Amino acid sequence: MTQATDFEPIFEHFIKQNSDHDLAHDLTHIKRVVNTAKVLAHQEQADLWIVIPAAYLHDCFSYPKDHPERHLSSLLAADKALQFLLSIEYPAHTYQAIYHAIAAHSFTANITPTTTEAQIVQDADRLDSLGAIGIARCIQVSCNLDSQLYSAHDPFAEERELNDQHYAIDHFFSKLFKLPETMNTVSGRKEANKRVIFMRQYLNQLRQEIGGF
C-alpha cells in the first residue's frame, strides 16, 4: 500500500533541481523541517499525506530576505508546489490542505494556519530558526546581507534601538526570542523554549568573550 513517505525521493529530487536559495534555506534546512514535522505530526496525530509534501515544498520558491515582495514567497511556493504535485499525480484530495500549509508557514506572509497540518509545518519551520542551528542560520543570513555580528559600541542593544538589518545578534531580540509564543502545538512550544535557553546561554558566553572574559 502506497504511503506518503514513498514520495520522499521524488520530493527531494525536485528540491535539488529547483534549489536557488541561500545557504540558510538549502536542502539541509528542508530535511530538518521535514524531520521535525514528522515528529510533531506523530505527536499531534496529523495527516502525513499533507504534512510531508508541505514540509518538503514549503521553500520551493523564495525571494531573498531583502526583496520587497518577500511576503509573497509562500504563496508563490504554494502555487509552484501544486503544479508539481499535479505533474506526479499526487492524491488530489490533499491539494487544498497542502496549499494552505505552505502558504501559512511564512512569518512574513502573516497567514493564520487553520489546520493541524498547517500548524505543524509552521512550527517545524520556525523551530529551525532556534537553537544551535538557528544561531548558525542567523549568521549565514546576516553574511548574505553584509551585516555585522554585533555592534561594537553596544553589542546587546542595551542603550540603542534594535537594528537586525545591521547586526545579526539584534535579530535574536527583535524576532527569534519571540517565536516560542507563536508556536501552535504544545510539543513545538516546549522545544522552542528549550532552544531559546541554549541561545541565551550562547549570548552569555559571547558577552564574556567580548568583555575579555
Image: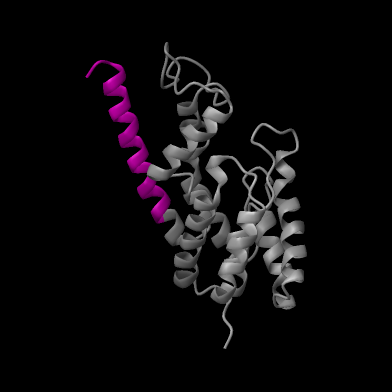
Number of numbered tags placed on the structure image: 0
Q: Is residue 31 left or right of residue 76?
A: left
Instruction: Note whether 101 is above or below 24 in the view shown.
Output: below
Closer to us: 82 or 108: 82
Most common SS among magenta residues: helix
Q: Residue 178: give x, y in percent of width and height.
A: 49, 41
Residue 86 in which image quadrant: bottom right
Residue 158 in which image quadrant: top left
Instruction: Note whether 191 is above or below 163 in the view shown.
Output: below
Residue 154 in sight from this viewpoint: yes
Q: Residue 204: give x, y in percent of width and height.
A: 30, 29
Q: Residue 55: give x, y in percent of width and height.
A: 58, 60
Q: Is residue 206 magenta?
A: yes
Q: Is residue 39 magenta?
A: no
Q: Which residues are magenta?
A: 190-213
Q: In the rendered image, which quarter contains the N terminus?
A: bottom right
**Outermost residue toward the left in this view:** 213
Q: Residue 130: give x, y in percent of width and height.
A: 44, 44
The residue shown at (70%, 61%) is 100
**Outermost residue toward the bottom in this view:** 1
Residue 118 in sight from this viewpoint: no
The residue shown at (54%, 74%) is 5
Q: In the rendered image, which quarter contains the C terminus?
A: top left
Q: How is the image coloured?
A: one colour
Q: Is residue 86 left or right of residue 120?
A: right
Closer to us: 24 or 186: 24
